[in-house]
Image (spheres, rainbow, N blue to C red):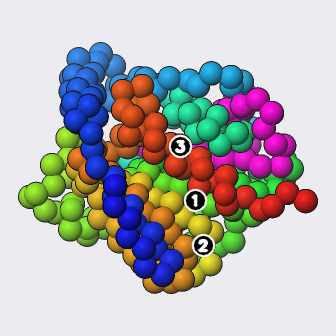
Amino acid sequence: MSIGERANLIEVRRSLSDDDREAASASIERTQRHFNEFHGTMREAYDAMTAQTPVADGVAMESVANADATGWWIRPRAAPAHRAILFLHGGAFVLGSAAGYRGFASQIAVRAGVDTFVLDYPLAPEHPFPAAHDAVRAALRWLANGGIREVALVGDSAGGGLALAALGVDERPALNVASVAAFSPWVDLALTGPSFHSDATRDAVLTRAVLANAAAAYLGAADPADARASPLHAIPGRLPPVALQVGTEELLFDDARRYAAAAAEQGNTVKLEIYEGLHHVFQRSTHELSSARHALDEVARFISLCWAPDA
């Protein structure tokens, strides 16, 4: 592990053990085989894949469906009533569901000891931009109206981008956002990152065509540089503390690095963890990878340190 620190940006690089290298390769092979052999729609296949993350012990789950928010509460024992994590799932804006992500969200909820709401935001192309962004804003208002006083925003991939976009330059959240944690966030739908275009990038999970097609499906005729879709392009100087995690083996590697550097330049406090040799949202593989468990421990610790002191 190496740590670099300059001003308000802390960058941590974590090396990959031989055991995790083998486990990561096996996990990728199983995922590829899953999609090749799955009988059903792509959305069903993606949900079945994300649902492989086991549900943590000691949580209760509650389905929610109302005019303001649809999704699932994940409630660990003895969680405080005034705090919550709002979890925003990945899937490139076209895939994913709260039900499929319950296991992953539960792993964060129990580590942080905080009730976690996994939001079902509307998917493209049926619901193009800015539908997902607007759903996140509505969910924040709903949480505030329900008595939540402070929230941590957590998301992976497209969900990480949504979490950061919810704190855009011209928008104020409905309640205090104490922190943001994003796994491999997709923050630039214009797809300008060097790692996206480099032949040296060996992403075994995503392809350039998948991301380009998903961006087109979500954006429609909208500007890909609109900060509500691509928060990299307009970062405010009043963000809560931000934690980003990314693997070196992914197309979105430079999305995380560029966002971290630009946010720090705006005066924000950012922690960037880079995991050598790991793939897109490796944190879901909590059973197979010690790196995944370590990464979630780090995120939970970060979230816990950022809450306002209890009166």
The residue sitting at 77% across, 62% down in the picture is 308
Upstream in sequence: badge 1 or badge 3: 1
The residue carrying pointer 1 sits among few (fewer than 14), some (14 to 19) or many (20 or more) residues within 10 Å by Cα, namely many
Residue type at the position of mark 2: Leu
Task: Work out which residue is located at the far left of the displayed protein and give it.
Answer: 199
Upstream in sequence: badge 2 or badge 3: 2
Quadrant housing the C terminus: bottom right
Q: Does residue 100 show up?
A: yes
Q: Secondary structure at mark 2?
A: loop
Q: Which residue is mark 3?
A: 297
Given this view, does label 1 or label 3 mark the residue nearer the observer? 3
Residue 40 vertical placement versus 211 (above, below): above
The residue sitting at 25% across, 69% down in the picture is 192
Given this view, does label 2 or label 3 mark the residue nearer the observer? 3
Cα–Cα gap, marks 1 and 2: 9 Å
- Of residues 273 and 38, the one nearer the viewer is 273
Q: Which residue is mark 1?
A: 180
Q: Position of residue 133 (x, y in %)?
A: 56, 58
The residue sitting at 53% across, 43% down in the picture is 297
- Of residues 130 and 59, the one nearer the viewer is 59
Residue type at the position of mark 3: Asp
Q: Does residue 213 show up?
A: no
Which residues fall within the magenta stretch? Answer: 67-90
Q: Which residue is mark 2?
A: 239
Q: Secondary structure at mark 3?
A: helix
Task: Work out which residue is located at the far right of the displayed protein and give it.
Answer: 311
